[in-house]
Image (tube, rainbow, N blue to C red):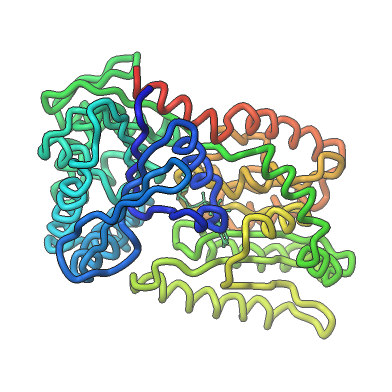
C-alpha cells in the first residue's frame, strides 16, 4: 500500500485538528492515520532564512513543516495567492491585484517548498497537493527529481477562460496543472472551464473519459465534489443543541425564528448583498418584523490583505444601518458577530435555526450549506436558502435557490422558507440528506485517491 503525502499551505498540527473548523481537516487526518502518512506545509511561523523542514511524528502520522521569511510569505500568500488568484478564481477582477513581484515570490516559495519536501518522499508515495497556493508544486517536485504520482485538488472555483485570461502569464498556471497526474475540481462547471482552457489556449486534447493531453503530458482531470462527515455532524448537532451555549441562544430568541449565516469574512461570500437582502425582506414583509432574528457569524480572515479590512468596515456599518432602521426597544433584527465558534457550537446553532442563508457570489463548494442540512432535526428540519453560484447547488438542488444579486429574490426566498409547511420541509431535507450521506468526506477522499492510484 502506498504512503499518502498531503501537501497544503497550512498543516493542521495534532491538537489543532480537533478545534480547526472543517471536516476537511478531520477527513484528511483520518486518511493519514489509516495508512500512516506525511503532512507537509508551512508551519504558520515566519522565520529568518531558507527553510529546513521540522519533522516529527505522532500517532503514526509524520508532520513536516517549514518556516517562511516575511517577504516570501507576503508575496506568496497575502500577495499572489490571496490578492491575485483568490479574487480571479471568484470572478472579482475588480479586486485582483497582480504584481510581477508577487508572482515571483509565489514561484519561489513553491520551488523552495518542493526542495524541502523532495528528500522526504519515498518512491511509492502518493502525493496529494491542495489548493491554489500550490499550483506549481508538481512541476517543482518533478524538477527536483520526483517521479511519484502527484494529484491536485482545487477547493475554489476554476474560472471560465475569459476571466482566467486576464491574469498575466495565465498559461503558466495551465502548464503547471498539467504536471500533475490527476487534477480534481469541485464541479463539472469548473472541470469544463479547465477543459476549455486546455483546448483553446494550450493546444491540448481532452477525451470524454477524462484524459487530458497538453504540454507534452498525459493526465486526468475530474470533478470530485467535496463532502462532510454527515453522520458525525448530525450526532454532534443532536447533542450540542442541549449545551449551555445553544440553550442561551434559544432562550434569547423568546420564540422568534432564527435565520443564520456562518461564513469566513470574505467578499466571495456575498455578505453585503445578504445584509441588504435582509433589509429588503423586512421592508417587503413587515409582518415578520419582531418575529425573526438574523444571526450572522463572520470570522475575520486574511486581515493583512487590505480588501478584507475594508470589507469588515463596510459590513459593520451595514449591520448598524439595518439595526438602526428596524430595531425596536425589545427587538434586535440582526446580530452580527466577528468571533469564531467551535464546530460543535455551530452545529447546535444550525439545529436551532429555521433558515440558513448561504448566498455566496461565487464559492467552490461551501461546506456550511452541507453542515446546516446535516445538523437539522429530522422531525422538524429548517430550510436552506442557497446561491446557485455555490458548488453545493449542483448537489443540493432541493434547497430554495435564490440569486444573491437580486435582493428581492432573496427576500422572497426568506418568506417562502419561513412559511414553508412541515411536510415540504421534511421532503426537501430528506432529498438533500440522501445526497450528503452518499457524497461524504470519506467518499470524496476515496474517489480522489482511487483515481490517483489507478
Ligand atoms: P471556505 O471558503 O473556508 O473553504 P466553507 O466551505 O464554507 O468555506 O467553510 C469551510 C469550513 O469552515 C466549514 O467547515 C465551516 O463550518 C467553517 N467555517 C466557516 N465560517 C466559519 C466561522 N465564521 N466560524 C467557524 N467556522 C467557520 C474553501 C472553499 C469552499 C470549499 C472549502 C472546502 O472556498 O468553497 O467548500 O474550501 O473545499
Q: Nearer the viewer, residue 76 or 30?
A: 30
In the image, is residue 354 above or below residue 128?
below
Can residue 369 be seen here? The reply is yes
Q: Position of 361 compared to 62: left or right?
A: right
Indicate the position of residue 215 as horizontal and vertical percent values.
Answer: 12, 28
In the image, is residue 338 above or below residue 41?
below
- Counting every numbered tag in the picture gives 0
Indicate the position of residue 305 as horizontal and vertical percent values.
Answer: 34, 70
- The residue at 65%/76% (across/down) is 322
Indicate the position of residue 54 as horizontal and vertical percent values.
Answer: 28, 56
Would you identify the image quadrant in which residue 38 lies?
Answer: top left
Q: Position of 276 compared to 188: left or right?
A: right
Tell me the quadrant of the picture where the N terminus can be found. Answer: top left
Can residue 287 be seen here? The reply is no
- The residue at 24%/23% (across/down) is 219
- The residue at 75%/80% (across/down) is 327
Q: Nearer the viewer, residue 438 or 296?
A: 438
Give the residue furthest to the bottom.
329
Q: Position of 303 compared to 376: left or right?
A: left
- The residue at 24%/32% (across/down) is 122
Give the residue furthest to the right.
255
Tell me the quadrant of the picture where the C terminus can be found. Answer: top left
Q: Position of 107 compared to 197: left or right?
A: left
Indicate the position of residue 406 as horizontal and vertical percent values.
Answer: 57, 55
Amino acid at each position: 500500500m502506498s504512503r499518502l503525502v498531503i501537501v497544503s499551505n497550512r498543516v493542521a498540527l495534532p491538537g489543532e485538528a480537533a478545534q480547526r473548523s472543517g471536516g476537511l481537516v478531520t477527513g484528511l487526518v483520518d486518511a493519514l492515520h489509516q495508512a500512516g502518512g506525511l503532512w507537509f506545509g508551512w508551519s504558520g511561523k515566519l522565520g529568518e532564512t531558507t527553510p529546513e523542514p521540522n519533522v516529527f511524528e505522532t500517532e503514526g502520522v509524520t508532520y513536516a513543516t517549514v518556516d517562511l521569511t516575511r517577504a516570501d510569505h507576503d508575496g506568496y500568500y497575502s500577495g499572489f495567492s490571496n490578492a491575485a488568484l483568490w479574487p480571479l478564481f471568484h470572478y472579482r477582477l475588480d479586486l485582483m491585484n497582480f504584481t510581477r513581484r508577487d508572482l515571483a515570490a509565489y514561484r519561489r516559495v513553491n520551488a523552495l517548498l518542493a526542495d524541502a519536501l523532495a528528500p522526504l518522499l519515498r518512491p511509492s508515495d502518493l502525493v496529494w497537493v491542495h489548493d491554489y497556493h500550490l499550483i506549481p508544486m508538481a512541476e517543482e517536485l518533478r524538477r527536483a527529481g520526483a517521479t511519484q504520482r502527484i494529484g491536485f485538488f482545487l477547493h475554489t472555483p476554476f474560472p471560465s477562460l475569459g476571466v482566467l485570461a486576464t491574469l498575466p502569464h495565465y498559461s503558466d498556471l495551465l502548464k503547471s496543472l498539467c504536471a500533475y497526474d490527476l487534477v480534481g475540481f469541485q464541479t463539472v462547471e469548473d472541470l469544463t472551464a479547465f477543459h476549455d482552457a486546455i483546448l483553446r489556449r494550450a493546444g491540448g486534447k481532452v477525451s470524454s473519459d477524462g484524459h487530458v493531453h497538453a504540454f507534452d503530458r498525459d493526465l486526468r482531470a475530474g470533478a470530485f465534489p467535496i463532502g462532510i462527515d454527515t453522520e458525525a455532524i448530525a450526532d454532534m448537532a443532536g447533542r450540542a443543541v442541549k449545551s449551555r451555549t445553544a440553550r442561551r441562544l434559544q432562550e434569547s430568541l423568546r420564540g422568534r425564528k432564527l435565520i443564520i449565516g456562518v461564513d469566513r469574512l470574505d467578499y466571495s461570500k456575498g455578505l453585503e448583498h445578504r445584509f441588504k437582502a435582509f433589509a429588503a425582506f423586512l421592508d417587503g414583509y413587515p409582518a415578520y418584523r419582531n418575529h425573526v432574528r438574523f444571526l450572522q457569524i463572520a470570522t475575520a480572515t486574511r486581515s493583512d490583505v487590505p480588501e478584507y479590512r475594508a470589507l469588515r468596515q463596510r459590513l459593520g456599518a451595514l449591520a448598524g444601518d439595518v439595526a438602526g432602521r428596524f430595531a425596536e426597544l425589545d427587538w434586535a433584527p440582526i446580530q452580527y458577530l466577528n468571533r469564531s465558534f467551535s464546530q460543535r457550537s455551530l452545529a447546535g446553532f444550525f439545529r436551532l435555526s429555521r433558515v440558513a442563508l448561504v448566498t455566496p457570489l461565487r464559492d467552490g463548494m461551501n461546506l456550511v450549506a452541507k453542515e446546516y442540512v446535516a445538523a437539522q432535526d429530522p422531525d422538524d428540519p429548517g430550510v436552506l436558502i442557497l446561491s446557485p453560484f455555490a458548488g453545493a447547488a449542483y448537489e443540493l438542488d432541493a434547497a430554495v435557490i435564490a440569486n444573491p444579486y437580486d435582493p428581492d429574490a432573496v427576500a422572497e426566498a426568506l418568506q417562502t422558507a419561513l412559511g414553508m409547511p412541515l411536510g415540504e420541509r421534511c421532503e426537501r431535507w430528506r432529498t438533500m440528506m440522501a445526497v450528503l450521506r452518499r457524497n461524504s468526506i470519506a467518499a470524496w477522499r476515496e474517489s480522489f485517491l482511487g483515481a490517483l492510484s489507478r
